[in-house]
Amino acid sequence: MSTISESNLPGVGRKFQVETLSGDRLTVVIHDDGMRELYHFERKNLNRPASVLTLSDGEARQIAGIIGGLTYVPKALPTSEIVLEDLVLEWFTLPAGSNGAGRTIRDLQVRTFTGASIVSLIEPTRTTRTNPEADTLLNEGATLILAGDRHSIAKLKELLVSGKA
């Protein structure tokens, strides 16, 4: 697993440094005004960036969603999770014959019964829906991106599979 460190940059923002498994380094500077700077250092020369990229806040968020798998989950990784302090994002594929298949988010009362949310879904056809509406129909085989704490996500998965929260 890679090593990540972070530090404050007074008057600028915050710096995150990732030492990758390959030995390369990625430094991300998030400015207080929302701009992002990405510095890529190759392991053969960690003193001088091999490339630099500047992104607006909107661009950075779009790329984060892409890298984080909000729009495409590689077939080799059907389940995954990201933990951000108390918030967990978990990818969950709705099994065939589950209680949630063929029902809407509203029918299941997802947030009311579990406290967790379905923030995105990827249909078996690869069609994606970010922030799906309450009337979105859940299809078996769809990959749902669930958000909440570990307990609420466990309750949501139980609701989706068996109908019990």
Image: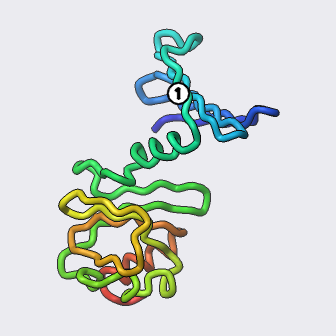
Relative side of 65 to 103, left or right: right
Relative side of 91 to 38, left or right: left
- Quadrant into which the C terminus falls: bottom left
Q: Quadrant of residue 12?
A: top right
Q: Quadrant of residue 131?
A: bottom left
Total residue callouts: 1
| Residue position for label 1 | 26
Judge the density around disc 1: few (<14), some (14-19), many (≥20) Cα neighbours within 10 Å: many
- Quadrant into which the N terminus falls: top left
| In this view, 147 is above or below 63 | below
Locate residue 48, reporting x and y percent: 57, 11
Residue at x 27%, y 72% (from the top left corner): 94
Locate residue 123, reporting x and y percent: 24, 64
Residue at x 34%, y 88% (from the top left corner): 163
Locate residue 41, reporting x and y percent: 51, 18
Q: Quadrant of residue 125?
A: bottom left
Name the secondary structure under disc 1: strand
Residue at x 25%, y 59% (from the top left corner): 127
Instruction: Please state which amino acid type lies under the numbered disc 1.
Output: Leu
